[in-house]
Amino acid sequence: MYLYILQHGEAEPKEIDPDRPLSKKGRSDIRVLAMHMQNMDVHIDTVFHSGKTRAEQSAQIIAELLAPDISPVKTDGLSPNDDPVEIVGDIEQMNGNILIASHMPFVSRLCSTLLTGNPDTEFASLPGTLICLERTDDNWRLAYMVRPDFI
């Protein structure tokens, strides 16, 4: 099982649009990631997002290219300040590869929880970063981490 944790792409400042949709660069960066994932033959079975516009748009861009038959699902517990411990059990009960589009600090706290057991260990990333964790037996390990500007 692979868990793809995506920090949404760059968003518009709230002074420009309080809903904070993806900026032109944010959309472009997520498309670059999606094409990279497609070139790596990534298969995704489930796509979740926080419900915030920028995360939903990021999830949709990835799903359109990698899993056009799958509709991204708004899921409670994925907002910036949510406690990742509340969804870890749900993730671990699922089968198949999952993509979660969310925000900082949730992305950091989820990765830290799965990799170290401590949600407060900082796991920093930038907008548009994709983190791939692999589950083997009862453990998670970092498979890779990539940003659009390195592709």
Image (cartoon, rainbow, N blue to C red):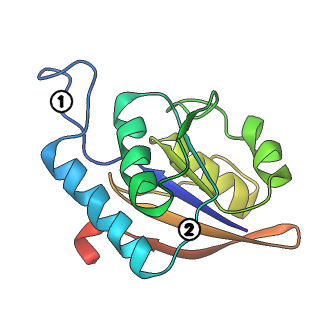
- Distance from Cα at disc 2 to Cα at disc 1: 28 Å
> In which quadrant will I find the N terminus?
bottom right
In the displayed structure, 91 sits above or below 146; it is above
Q: Who is closer to the viewer here, 98 or 11?
A: 98
- Residue 13 numbered tag: 1
The reply, left or right, for residue 139 in relation to residue 112 is right
In the figure, 10 relative to 115: above or below?
above
Q: Secondary structure at mark 2?
A: strand
Residue 24: x, y in percent?
14, 46
Residue 47 appears left or right of 14: right
Q: Which residue is found at the position 53% from the left and 54% from the top?
A: 122
Q: Position of residue 95 (x, y in %)?
A: 79, 59
Residue, disc 2: 132
| Residue type, mark 1 in image | Pro
Find residue 151 and name its label: none
Q: Quadrant of residue 143?
A: bottom right
Q: Position of residue 39 (x, y in %)?
A: 40, 80
Q: Assess disc 1: are there few (<14), some (14-19) or many (≥20) residues with their C-alpha within 10 Å of its C-alpha.
A: few
User: Residue lying farthest bottom?
Assistant: 40
Q: Is residue 119 above or below residue 129?
A: above
- Residue at 26% of width from left, 32% of height from top? 21
